[in-house]
């Protein structure tokens, strides 16, 4: 276990650095001047040449690409992510202030997906080719296929503008949380249902399940105690990937519903080419993905004895 942790931590450092370097390279080579964009957003007027030069000199934007990268790495070794070009505040503080809203959104969507998707996938697998199974397969396929931004707009039109039940925008109450959570949860729930159903069907056809049935065990015990545990092992991988997708993919939903999380802050920073914020976002999301994968590997070790045995060998 200790070797696994050390190997993953070392890999994580390289992955995060490479991801940040690539994102910075793409932004640096993109057309346009961040100083001009930000000054125009702040004043609403076209900035003069002197104003642009002064802004670039103040934020070291006129330095070569490699120098700016090394400056950012130096800050990173001191636990800093730089200062936002738009707000003038430290990037880490900006993200910290917005992480709560994003985690609230992603956590609620993930919890809703597991509560709904897991039992439906199991029930569909226990009744293969039944009417319920066919309906679930069609509905889950539709759920996977619907784009999040389109679903969010449709929910907004229906439940906010037409019926007036829920607010379109805003943050702070459960009513504000409903539409963005449902928008995020639909696709993940549909994927979870399809994956759980497929894994349960495979496990239910194994010999030890047939033996359990021959011994007269009740179906409820066979399905929920013996089959589900083995079927959940690959499902954990999917949940880990989906959680990372939730945090990174909340960008679209937060923009549609004006949710004050890191996703909306990131989109606004892209428009302004706020380099430190974009680099910080990529670094943090890469770290979250690596952490989630590490937790999934650790859960594997505890859930599957074969992994423990292979690790010792």
Image: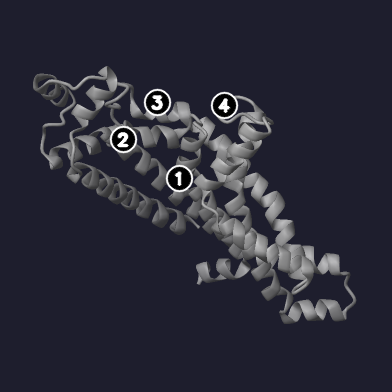
Q: Are marks 4 and 1 in contact (CB under 8 Å)?
A: no
Q: Is residue 262 above or below residue 240?
A: above
Residue 224, percent from left and from top: 78, 63
Instruction: Characterize the local packing of mark 2: few (<14), some (14-19) or many (20 or more) Cα atoms within 10 angstroms.
Output: few
Q: Nearer the viewer, mark 4 or mark 1?
A: 4
Q: Determine crowd level at label 3: few under 14, some 14-19, many 20+ residues with C-alpha closer than 10 A.
A: some
Residue 201 image label: none
Q: Nearer the viewer, mark 4 or mark 3?
A: 4
Q: Earlier in the sequence, mark 4 or mark 3?
A: 3
Q: Which residue is mark 3?
A: 93
Q: Residue at x 82, y 76 (%)?
A: 212
Residue 232 in sight from this viewpoint: no
- Residue 233 drawn at (x, y percent): 62, 63
Q: Which residue is mark 2?
A: 271
Q: For residue 170, what is the image quadrant?
A: top right
Q: Secondary structure at mark 2?
A: helix
């Amino acid at each position: 276990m200790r070797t696994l942790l050390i190997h993953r931590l070392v890999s994580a450092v390289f992955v995060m650095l490479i991801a940040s370097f690539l994102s910075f390279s793409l932004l640096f080579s993109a057309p346009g001047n961040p100083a001009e964009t930000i000054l125009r957003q702040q004043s609403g007027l076209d900035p003069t040449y002197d104003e642009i030069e002064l802004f670039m000199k103040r934020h070291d934007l006129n330095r070569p690409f490699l120098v700016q990268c090394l400056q950012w790495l130096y800050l990173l070794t001191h636990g800093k992510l730089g200062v936002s070009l738009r707000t003038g505040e430290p990037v880490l503080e900006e993200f910290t202030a917005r992480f709560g809203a994003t985690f609230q959104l992603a956590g609620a969507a993930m919890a809703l997906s597991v509560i709904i998707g897991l039992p439906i996938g199991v029930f569909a697998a226990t009744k293969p080719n039944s009417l319920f199974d066919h309906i679930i397969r069609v509905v889950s396929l539709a759920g996977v296929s619907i784009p999040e931004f389109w679903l969010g707009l449709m929910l907004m039109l229906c439940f906010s503008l037409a019926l007036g039940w829920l607010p379109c925008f805003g943050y702070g109450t459960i009513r504000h949380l409903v539409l963005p959570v449902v928008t995020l949860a639909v696709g993940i729930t549909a994927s979870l249902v399809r994956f759980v159903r497929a894994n349960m069907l495979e496990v239910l056809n194994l010999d030890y399940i047939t033996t359990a049935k021959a011994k007269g065990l009740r179906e409820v015990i066979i399905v929920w105690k013996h089959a589900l545990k083995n079927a959940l092992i690959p499902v954990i991988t999917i949940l880990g990937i989906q959680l990372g997708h939730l945090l990174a993919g909340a960008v679209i939903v937060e923009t549609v519903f004006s949710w004050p999380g890191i996703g909306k802050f990131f989109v606004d920073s892209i428009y302004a080419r706020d380099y430190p914020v974009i680099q910080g976002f990529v670094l943090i999301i890469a770290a979250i993905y690596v952490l989630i994968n590490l937790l999934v590997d650790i859960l594997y070790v505890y859930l599957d004895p074969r992994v423990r045995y292979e690790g010792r060998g």
